[in-house]
Image (tube, rainbow, N blue to C red):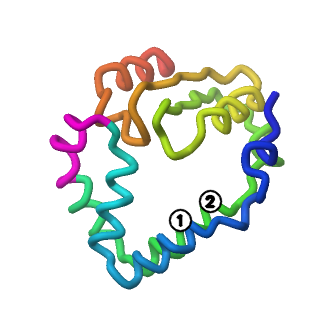
Amino acid sequence: MHDQRRHNPDGFSNNPALEDWKESLLSNTVNATKGYVGMMLYAPEGKAQFGQQTLEESLKFPARECAHLLPNHVYTDWRDVIPTITLPTLVITAKNSYVKGVNNEWTHVQIAGSRFRLFETAHMMFMEESTAFNEAVMEFIG
């Protein structure tokens, strides 16, 4: 079992990079969003195929609300809630995601009976590895 604090020693509240991104999102929305999309897509083919579409869709979300929502999501500590999940759960992560795989492995261990799937790409594995992703989901839902 992994302790998330060990992997994030500053806890859930000291993330200068996230604060910098939030400020850049408000001052230069397009470039900040391009950088974020670049982190979510991993493979050069995926970036070429899905980058523009992902950027356009991402820019539809108002920057001010996004600048509030992402830090809120990142800084919320769900460790006391996750072990209470009793529904069938598929925990998904990717080797090159900005969300460290060990965090999702911890989540998997905490949810009794959950299944775990590790993909090769990054956060947008459902686009870059659509066949494998769809197979994993179909297998999970039966």
Provide residue 74's location: percent of width, then percent of height: 62, 59
Q: Residues within 10 Å of mark 2 (few under 14, many from 20)?
A: some
Q: Quadrant of the N terminus?
A: top right
Numbered circle sitting on residue 74: 2
124 magenta-colored? no
Q: Helix, strand or loop at disc 2?
A: helix
**Mark 1 is on which residue type?**
Leu
Provide residue 121's location: percent of width, then percent of height: 39, 31
Label pair 2/1, CB-CB below 8 angstroms: yes
Picture quarter containing residue 122? top left
Provide residue 24's location: percent of width, then percent of height: 42, 77
50 magenta-colored? yes
Q: Residue at x 29, y 62 (%)?
A: 34
Task: Find the residue positioned furthest to the bottom.
Answer: 27
Picture quarter containing residue 137? top left
What residue does disc 1 label?
70
**Mark 2 is on which residue type?**
Val
Residue 47 placement, left or right of 22: left
Residue 24 placement, left or right of 127: right
**Position above or below: 62 against 17:** below
From the image, give the main secondary structure of the stretch colored magenta.
helix
Q: Which residues are magenta?
A: 43-53
Residue 71 placement, left or right of 34: right
